Image: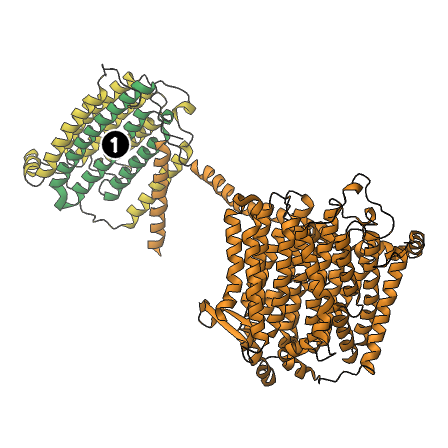
Chain colours: A yellow, B orange, C green
Amino acid sequence: MLSIPSTIPLLGWTWNDLLFLILAGGLLGSALMVVLGRDIIRCGLWMIVCFLFLAGLYVLLGNPLVAGAQVLVYIGAISVLILFAVMLTQSKAGPARLVFHHQAWAAALAAIGLAVVLVIVDGATSWPLAQPDRTATATTDVASKLFSDFVLPFEVVSVLLLAAVIGGVFLAKKDDAPRSDSDI
Amino acid sequence: MTQLTVLLLLLPVAGFAITALVGRRLGASSWVPAVAAIVATWAVAMVVVYGQLSGGNGDTGLQVTLYRWIPAGAFTIDFNLAVDNLTAALLIVVTTVGMLVHVYSIGYMAHDPGRWRFFAYLNFFMFSMLLLVLAGNFLLLFAAWELVGLSSYLLIGFWYRRHSAALAAKKAFLVNRVGDVGFALGIMAVWSTVGTLNFTDVFNLLPAKLASGAIQPWEMTGIALLLFCGAVGKSAQFPLHVWLPDAMEGPTPVSALIHAATMVNAGVYFVARANPIFSQSGSAMVIVAAIGIFTALLAASIALTQTDIKRVLAYSTLSQLGYMFAALGVGAYVAAIFHLMAHGFFKGLLFLDSGSVIHGVHDEQDMNRMGGLWRKLPVTHATMLVGTLAIAGIPPLAGFFSKDEILGQSFKAGFLWVWIVGIGVAGLTAFYMFRLMGKTFYGPSHVDPAVEPQVHESPRSMTVPLVLLAIPSALLGLGLGLPFGAGAISSWLDPVFAHAEQTLGRSPESFSLFGLDGALILISVTVAAVGTIAGMRLFGFHWPFTARETAPLPDRVAAITARLRPLYTASFHKWWFDDLNDLIFVRFGSRLANGAWWFDRTVVDGTVNGTGRFIQRTGREVRQIQTGHVQNYALGIALGLLVVAGGYLLLAGR
Amino acid sequence: MSQNLDAYLVLSALLFCIGVFGFLARRNAISMLMCIELMLNAVNLAILAFGAFVPSLHGNAAVIALIVMAVAAGEATVGLAIVIAIYRNRRTPLVDEYAQMRD
C-alpha cells in the first residue's frame, strides 16, 4: 500500500490545507461567475456549483449534517425554484449594459471597500487559535438541541415557513376575477 | 360758565351730526340745523366772552378739564379747555364771522345740490376751530390743528368733480403737513424738556427751568422755531405759502371763513399763545419777524398783477398775515392780535363781497371781464369800498389803527428794516386793492355781452351779512383802538402778554400824538394815501354820493407795465415758486421715488423671490436622489455602512 | 491554513462582498435574489467556522445554521412569488423599470 505522506511534499501543507484551498478557490470563482455572468441561466447553474463547494467546506468544518441539508435544500429546492422563476419571467441574456446597472462601478467600489474593512477587522481581532474540532456533529446532538435549547426558534421557523408558503401561493396565483389597476 | 364753554363745542358738533345724517333729505332746508347751531354758538360765545372780559374768571381765566384723555404714567394729557382774554378775542372773530358766513352761504349755495354736505363741513370746521382756540394743552391744540386742516381739505375740494379743486385740496393738505412735522417735533421737544404739555404749567415752569440751566438757550430757540414751522404751514408764510392761492378753488364762503378770517389765523393765535416760549429766544423772534415781513412783501408784489379777483384777495391775505407775524416777531403782541381781529372782519367782508360779485356776473372770476358794476351791484359795491378802505389803512377805519400800531411798535422796538418794508407794503396794498376796485366796479364794462343784461344784485341773505360785516370793519378800530396805546384792546390783552413784555424789557410808554408816534402815523397815512390815489387814477374811481367819476387810464398802465416788464413777468408768475416746487419735489422727487421702487423691486423682492427660487432649485436637484429605485437606496446603505465602519476603524485605531 | 479561523472568516467576508456587489449591480430581480442567497450562505459559513474553532459553540453552530437555512428558503419563496406577481403586471423582470411610485 502506498503511504500517503502527511504533508504535501514540496509545500509543506497538510492535505486539509490543500482541500481547503481547492474548495475556497472554487467557491470564490463560482460566486464571481454568478454575479458577473450575462446569461441568467448560466448564473443559476454557477450558483448550484457554488453551493456544492460550500457543502464541501461544511464537511471540512465537521458538519456533514448541514452539508447534506445544504445540498437538499439549497440545490434541490431553492435553486430549482429560482430556475423555474427565471423561465417564468422569460429573463433574457444580453450585453453587459443591459444586465448591469449604471451604478455597477459604484457598487464594485462599495463591495471592495466593505471587503477591505472586514478583512482589517478580522486581522485586528485576536481569535483563539484552537485546533479546529473536526469531529462530526452527531445528528442526535443536533436533534436534542433543536428540541430543548432551540425549541423557540424552531417553532417560530415553522410558523414562518407556513406563512411563506401561504404568502407565496397567494402572491403567485393567477387572478381570475377582474381587478382594478390600483392593486399592485 | 363751564357748561357754556363746553356748549361752544357741542353745538357745532350737533349741527354737523344732524346735517350729515338727515341733511340730504331736508333738501332745500338743509341749512336750517347748521345755521341754527352756529347762531346758538355765537350767542353762547358772546356770553362767555363777556364773562371773561369783564373779569369774571379771575386772573387765570377759566380752566375746564373734561376728562383724562391719555393716562400713560408720566405722560398724562387731559382734555382741557382754557378761556382767557386772548381766547375771548379770538372767539369774537371766529364766531361772528362764522355765523355771518353761514347765513351768507344760504343764498350763495342755494342752487348747489350738495349744499347739505357744505353745511355739514362748515359746522365741522367751526367745531375744529373752536376746539383749537379753546384748547388748554399742546396736544389737544395739535389735534384740533389737524382737524382744521381736514376741514379745509374737505371744503377746498368741495366740488370734488373738478380736477383743479381736488388738486388744490391735496396741495393744501400736503403743504400743511410739511409744517406739521416741525410742529410735532416742537411739541415733543417741549415735552422732553419741560415734562408737561399743559399751557399754564409749561409757561409757569419755563422761566425757572431756563434760569437753572435745565434748558439751554439754543434748545429754546430750537423749540420756538420748530413750533413756528407749524404756524408757517397753517398760516401760509414763505416758503409754505403756495397752497393758499390755489385754495381759492373752494366756494367763496369757504375762502372767506377759512382762508381769511379763521383757519389761517390759527398760526398767529398759536404764536401769540406760546409767547412765553418765543419771547425767551431773541433769534427766534427775529426769524419770525423776517419771514413775516418777507412774506408780506412777496405776496403784495404778486397781488399787483393777478387777474382773478379771488387770487388778489388771497395774496392780500398772505400779505396781511405776514404783517401779523412781523408784529409777533418784534414783540408787538397786542398789535398783532388787534390786526388779526380787524383783518378777520374786513377780509371776510372782502371775500364775501367778491363772492357776491362773482354770483352777480354768473361765475366769472376774471377781473378783465368785469367793470362798471357799481351801478348794478350797489350794496356789494358800497361794502367792498368800506373793506378796501379798511385794508388800505385809511383812517378812521379799522385797518388804520391795527396796521399803524404794528408799524409804530416795530419802529420803536428798533426793527427799522421791518418798519421800512412794512411801509412799502402798506403802499402796495392800497394800490392793488384800488386796482381791484377799479377793474371790477369802475370804468367801461368788459362784461361778456351775453351775461350783461342778467347782472344783478345778490339776494338779501347775502347782502345782509355784508352790511353786518362792514360795520365792525369800519368801527372796530375806533371802538378798541382809542385812545391810542390805551384802548380797550390793550386793556384786554396786556395781561396776557405782560410776562413776555417784561422778558423783552419793554416798558409801557405813553403815546405822544405830537411826538414820535404822531410822526409815524403821518408817514404811514401818507404812504397809504399815495397808493390809494395812484390806484384810483390808473384804474378808475367813482366818488360816492356824487356823480363824479375818474376814468381809468389803460394806456398809462400799459406803458408802466412795459417799462417794468421783467418785474411784471416775475410777479405774474408768482416768482416762479410753484415751478420751483414742481421741479424739486415733483420731478426730482418722482425720480427718487422711481429709484426707490427699482430698489424695492430688484433688491428686496429679488432677495425674497430669489430665496424662494433658490430653495426650489436646490430642492429639485436634491430630489433627484429619490430615484425610486431600490438598488440605488441599497447602494446608499452600503456606502453609508462603509463610511461608518471605516470611520470607526480609523478612530478606534488612534 | 485551514487551522486558522482567519482564513474561514476572510473567505466568508469575500463571499459576502461578492454577494453585495451582485445585489447592487444586477438589473434582473432574480439575479438579486441569487445574490441574497450567496450572502446568506456566507453567513452560514462564518457561523460554522466559529462552531469549529470555539469549543463551547460546537453543537449549537449546526442548529443555528439549519435555522438560517430554513429562513433563507422561506424568504426565497416569498421573494420569487413577488417577482412573478410583479412580472405579470409589468412584463419585465428588470428592477429599474419598476418606477411606478416615482415622481
Depth check: give the residue in front, B8 or A59.
B8
In the picture, which quadrant includes the C terminus of chain B? bottom left
Residue A27 vertical placement versus B228 (above, below) = above
Which amino acid, by three-letter code, is at mark 1? Answer: Leu
Depth check: give the residue in front, B511 or A146.
B511
Q: Residue at x 84, y 50 (%)?
A: B372
Picture quadrant of residue B565 = bottom right
Depth check: give the residue in front, A103 or B182.
B182
Residue A113 vertical placement versus B474 (above, below) = above
Across and down, in percent, residue B426 comes to 81, 67
Picture quadrant of residue B59 = bottom right
Residue hosting label 1: A23
Q: Residue at x 78, y 59 (%)?
A: B385
Residue B10 in sight from this viewpoint: yes
Would you say A155 lies left or right of B568 here? left
Q: How many marks?
A: 1
User: Element at badge 1?
Assistant: helix
Would you say B463 lies left or right of B450 here? left
Residue A62 vertical placement versus B334 (above, below) = above
Across and down, in percent, residue B10 comes to 50, 61
State which chain disc 1 sits on: A
Across and down, in percent, residue B104 comes to 65, 53
Residue B291 in sight from this viewpoint: no
Across and down, in percent, residue A27 comes to 28, 31
Q: Residue at x 82, y 46 (%)?
A: B369
Q: Residues within 10 Å of mark 1 (few under 14, many from 20)?
A: many
Would you say B304 lies left or right of B282 here? right
Q: Residue at x 60, y 79 (%)?
A: B215
Depth check: give the residue in front, B192 or B436.
B436
